[in-house]
Amino acid sequence: MILSDLLTAKVFDDAGVRLGRVIDARFALDGQPEAEASLAQARLVGLLVSPHSRGSYLGYERRDLNAPWPIAKLERWRHRGSFLVLWEDLHSIDDDGVHLRAGFTRNDVRLG
């Protein structure tokens, strides 16, 4: 599976209730780059879920990105209620979408 397969996938809780769609992913860079011209190894931290939109935040979820203000305000409104689900909270991924484990945590989208 590649990341583009997950984008816009439906997300369900453990009871099968639809929570929204995957709109983005969060990665962490671990360690040092192996060579001067390369990046450190990337590790998937989790998936961003939006209950109201299919599109990306376009980076406006970052605290310091707020200009131009009309676009920032619109994007924050479109993605109200969005949350980050950590990788360890995923139960399974199938043709229906992403299924979360019982007791998953809705993390702040700015985490990670």
Image (tube, grey):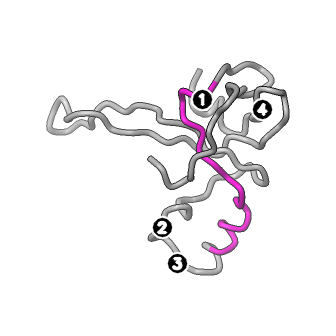
Residue at 70% from the left image edge and 59% from the top image edge: 79
Q: Is residue 75 left or right of residue 17?
A: left
Earlier in the chain: of badge 4 and badge 2, it is 4
Q: CA distance from mark 3 to mark 1?
A: 33 Å
Q: Amino acid at mark 3?
A: Ala
Earlier in the chain: of badge 4 and badge 1, it is 4
* Numbered mark located on residue 89 in the image: 1
Q: CA distance from mark 4 to mark 2?
A: 28 Å
Q: Position of residue 78 (x, y in %)?
A: 73, 63
Q: Residues within 10 Å of mark 2 (few under 14, many from 20)?
A: few
Instruction: Mark 2 vs mark 3: give the one in front.
Output: 2
SS for tag 3?
A: loop
* Numbered mark located on residue 63 in the image: 2
Q: CA distance from mark 1 to mark 2?
A: 25 Å
- Farthest residue, direction bottom: 69
Instruction: Mark 1 vs mark 2: give the one in front.
Output: 1
